[in-house]
């Protein structure tokens, strides 16, 4: 068979020869048509759930634990029709319930590693439990964590303190929680008075901190205290969701980040309607008042916000919209650019 490339113009042949492509080009021309390939298999796994941003010289890493889907009825203070309308407005409506992300935040201040909230660990089956694999994907191990600051002692924030065998998952860390929350959730007498369906929450809280209490690495601080394991971190009392619910304010290089815990569970509903509470609020009226004040403060001071239940990575700003508020998520960018 004559070489079909000989029929190409001489300058083209010279170019192919100079590039060492003559043989491969000839093979391509002479090769029969390839048969159609079968469809590639579908993949459903997501990328690792971590996202970094700079806060001045600090590096903040958001960690995804998973998501929960409670029924719409857990939101109180709005009709079913209003809830559906608010959710549909942001394309967030799903008939089986409200999708609520669970996030934790790791702050590297150059001297130590501080984790704010620890996720749900094994307390919610396969729905949660992503903190450890995502922590490792982000380049850290549980042994690297120096301090864990709990916004409150609900199981989706505290159960992740435990390893699968019930030991301390963060063996080198001291765990901090507000005295108000510790006095409520860790007191057997208070638990005994609670409704029967609420008592597991008390048990899970006690179990979560037990190995740290035993090792003398659990600190119940009072408002106004300085945290030895997190010097310079501001304690912002935000009660209502739980009696001692607390947010943490990190300041670095002229930037401020408020890790606010459970101020908002459904951004599509509770930002435009801050008067809507959630069934899990211990004091719903106080939670509403706290949310209204904190949202106004956040907008006024132009704070970065990290929300435990905002859509992952849960980092962004709050802006006013009409008589309510709206969420402005962080824009994906290299770490060096996000803190500016």
Image (tube, grey):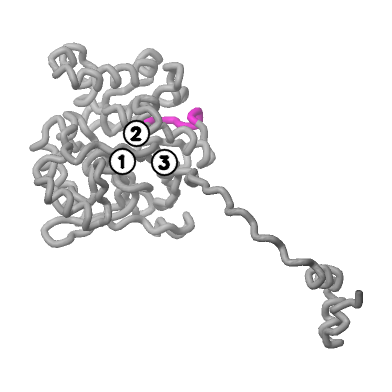
Mark 1 or mark 3, which is nearer the start of the sequence? 3
Look at the picture and state if 337 lies above or below 111.
below
Give the numbered dot on residue 67: none
- How far apart, in angstroms, are the residues tagged by discs 1 and 2? 8 Å
Q: Going 61% across and 54% down the picture, which residue do you hit?
A: 38
Q: Is residue 7 magenta?
A: no
Where does the image place residue 175, in percent across and percent down from the top left? 36, 26
Residue that appears at 34% across and 21% down: 208
- The quarter of the picture where residue 211 lies is top left
Q: 110 or 298: nearer the eye? A: 298
Describe the element under mark 2 as helix, strand or loop.
Answer: loop
What crowding class fits label 1: few (fewer than 14 Cα within 10 Å), some (14-19), or many (20 or more)? many
Q: Is residue 305 visible?
A: yes
What residue would you read off at disc 2?
Answer: 117
Instruction: Choose top left, top right, bottom left or bottom right for residue 96.
Output: top left
Disc number placed over residue 308 in the picture, else none: 1
Q: Report how far apart the C-alphas of labels 2 and 3 lie in the structure.
A: 10 Å
Q: Within the magenta stretch, is there residue 145? A: yes
- Nearer the observer, 270 or 294: 270
Examine the rendered structure and indicate whether residue 320 appears above or below residue 249: below
Q: Is residue 232 left or right of residue 236?
A: right
Quarter of the image with the C terminus in it: bottom left
Question: Which numbered mark, 2 or 3, is in the foreground of this view?
Answer: 3
**Residue 274 percent coordinates (x, y):** 14, 48
Label 1 or label 2, whichever lies nearer to me, is: 1
Mark 3 crowd level (few <14, some 14–19, many ≥20, 10 Å Cα): many
Tell me where the magenta segment starts and ends, as one range.
142-149
Q: Pointers 1 and 2 in contact (CB under 8 A)?
A: yes
- Pointer 3: what residue? 63
Q: Nearer the viewer, residue 286 or 69?
A: 69
């Amino acid at each position: 068979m004559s070489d079909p490339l000989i029929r190409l113009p001489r300058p083209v042949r010279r170019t192919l020869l100079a590039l060492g492509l003559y043989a491969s080009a000839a093979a391509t021309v002479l090769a029969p048509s390839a048969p159609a390939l079968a469809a590639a298999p579908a993949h459903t796994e997501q990328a690792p759930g971590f996202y970094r941003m700079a806060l001045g010289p600090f590096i903040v890493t958001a960690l995804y634990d998973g998501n929960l889907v409670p029924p719409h009825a857990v939101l109180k203070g709005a009709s079913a029709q209003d809830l559906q309308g608010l959710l549909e407005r942001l394309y967030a409506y799903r008939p089986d319930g409200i999708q609520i992300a669970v996030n934790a935040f790791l702050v590297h201040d150059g001297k130590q590693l501080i984790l704010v909230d620890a996720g749900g660990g094994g307390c919610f089956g396969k729905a949660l439990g992503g903190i450890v694999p995502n922590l490792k994907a982000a380049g850290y191990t549980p042994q690297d964590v120096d301090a864990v600051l709990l916004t409150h002692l609900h199981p989706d924030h505290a159960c992740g303190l435990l390893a699968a065998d019930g030991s301390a998952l963060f063996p080198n860390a001291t765990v901090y929680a507000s005295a108000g929350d510790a006095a409520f959730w860790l007191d057997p007498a208070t638990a005994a008075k609670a409704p029967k369906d609420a008592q597991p929450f008390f048990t899970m809280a006690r179990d979560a901190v037990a190995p740290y209490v035993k090792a003398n690495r659990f600190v119940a601080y009072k408002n106004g205290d300085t945290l030895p394991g997190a010097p310079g971190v501001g304690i912002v009392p935000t009660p209502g969701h739980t009696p001692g619910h607390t947010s943490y304010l990190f300041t670095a290089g002229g930037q401020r980040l408020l890790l606010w815990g459970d101020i908002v569970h459904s951004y599509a509903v509770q930002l435009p309607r801050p008067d809507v509470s959630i069934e899990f609020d211990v004091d719903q009226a106080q939670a509403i008042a706290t949310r209204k004040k904190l949202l106004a403060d956040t907008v006024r001071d132009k704070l970065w916000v990290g929300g435990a239940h905002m859509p992952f990575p849960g980092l962004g700003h709050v802006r006013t919209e009409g008589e309510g508020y709206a969420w402005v998520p962080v824009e994906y960018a290299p770490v060096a650019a996000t803190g500016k």
